[in-house]
Image: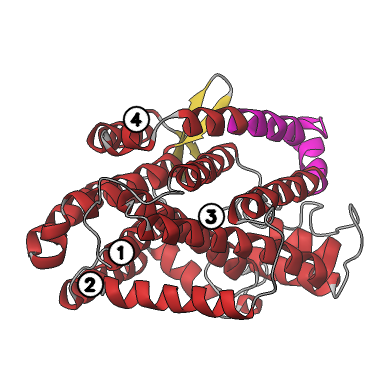
Amino acid sequence: MAGLAQTTISKINEAYGRWAPKLPAEVNMRNVLIFCVLALLCLGSIMVASASMPYADRLHENAFHYVTRHGISILVACIAAFLAYKVPMNVWFNNTFPLWLLTIGLLAVVLVAGTEVNGSTRWIRLAGFTLQASEVAKVMMAIFTADYVVRRAEEVRNNLSGLFRLGAVMIITVGLILAEPDLGATAVIVLMILGVFFLAGAPPIQFIAFLAAIIVGLAAAIVFEPYRLQRALSFTNPWADPLGTGYQLSNALMAFGRGEWFGVGLGHSIQKMSYLPEAHTDFMLAILGEEFGFFGITTVLVLSFTMVVCCIKIGHRALKHQYLRAGYLAYGISIIFLLQILVNAGMNMGMLPTKGLTLPFISYGGSSLIMCAVMVSLVLKIEATTNQVNPSKEESSF
């Protein structure tokens, strides 16, 4: 299956190279990725200010409350990204088990001493700020899975033990996340693991069994929790109960409708005036659509998907140069970004149930912003360290 996946990616790259216009040498994947991240960060900062000021003024009597905290988060994210970039890739891959134990410890602390918000206990309060442990888990599980599918390559491709070992680690991790509860982060992590497992060459039977188990597990998590089932059903027709279960989505759709092609203008949104809950976090895209219209949404989505494509191409080059762990890590990060973009955009537009997933570099949320910056930093490190063919010749699935 790895051969099928890599052949498909290779053919896409060949078609792109054949038909794409010739660009200057400066326009490479690294520079395009940095440009996309900076552009999204600038747009996100503007929208956080616009969407949060009325809410912050009413709740904290300080219109710049969330803007200030967002600025601090950006500073911390830059520091975290710089430190992550300075760590050699082998240090990450040689310490995956301690990193996983650290992740499990953070998730356990959340359940014991976490801060509850809107019925969910997902945050650890530190010096006036909060850390969302599930965001850390996404990055650590991407590193763990990338190392596992290479270190246990023989088992992954030929024996069920490879599936069972990885499945046990996944169940322990997502079990703690589901206990918070956080179904959105759970879905992102399990689908990322599944994607990397597929790309690493898992046999079709194991892949199908893994996929079926994930579908059954996610379905059970929805069906056996009344509020999740209600949320999953309400998105199909939010107008049936626009003041109850469909309140958030119906107001988000009204925001998109008001925006039309070019929006009502920066700062002129009506829905952010306490009509749309979480306007500066999960439903930021709806406010952006109201103020900048279809043009603004298209700009953000094009930048976001271009960022994902850059990560994929960097990962593909790493695999071609025999840096398997680095390549699979870049793919895992690409999957995380892609899922968060699709789920957040989908729930804002009424195509998916409401989930607590941020839009990378756009939505307000310190933990998400910091971990997204760390993931981009890891991809840039992969790009910088895999320019030449790996002399150690790691085992390849090509």
Residue 194: which numbered mark, if any? 1
Q: Nearer the viewer, residue 303 or 117?
A: 303
Would you name the residue on which mark 2 appears? 207
Query: Badge 3: how crowded within 10 Å, few (<14), some, or many (20+)?
Result: many
> At numbered mark 4, what does the secondary structure look like: helix, strand or loop?
helix
Q: Nearer the viewer, residue 114 or 18?
A: 18
Q: Residue at x 69, y 31 (%)?
A: 69
Q: Residue at x 72, y 32 (%)?
A: 71
Residue 109: which numbered mark, if any? 4
Residue 357: which numbered mark, if any? 3
Query: Badge 1: how crowded within 10 Å, few (<14), some, or many (20+)?
Result: many
Mark 2 / mark 3, whichever is N-terminal:
2
Q: Is residue 397 left or right of residue 234?
A: left
Q: Which residues are magenta?
A: 50-77
* Whole-number angstrom distance, CA of label 4 to CA of label 1: 27 Å
Contact? badges 4 and 1 (CB < 8 Å):
no
Which of discs 4 and 1 lies nearer the camera? The answer is 1
Q: Position of residue 168 (x, y in %)?
A: 17, 52
In the rendered view, would you say 93 is above or below 147?
Answer: above
Amino acid at dot 3 = Leu
Q: Position of residue 176 (x, y in %)?
A: 30, 45
Q: Residue at x 22, y 50 (%)?
A: 148
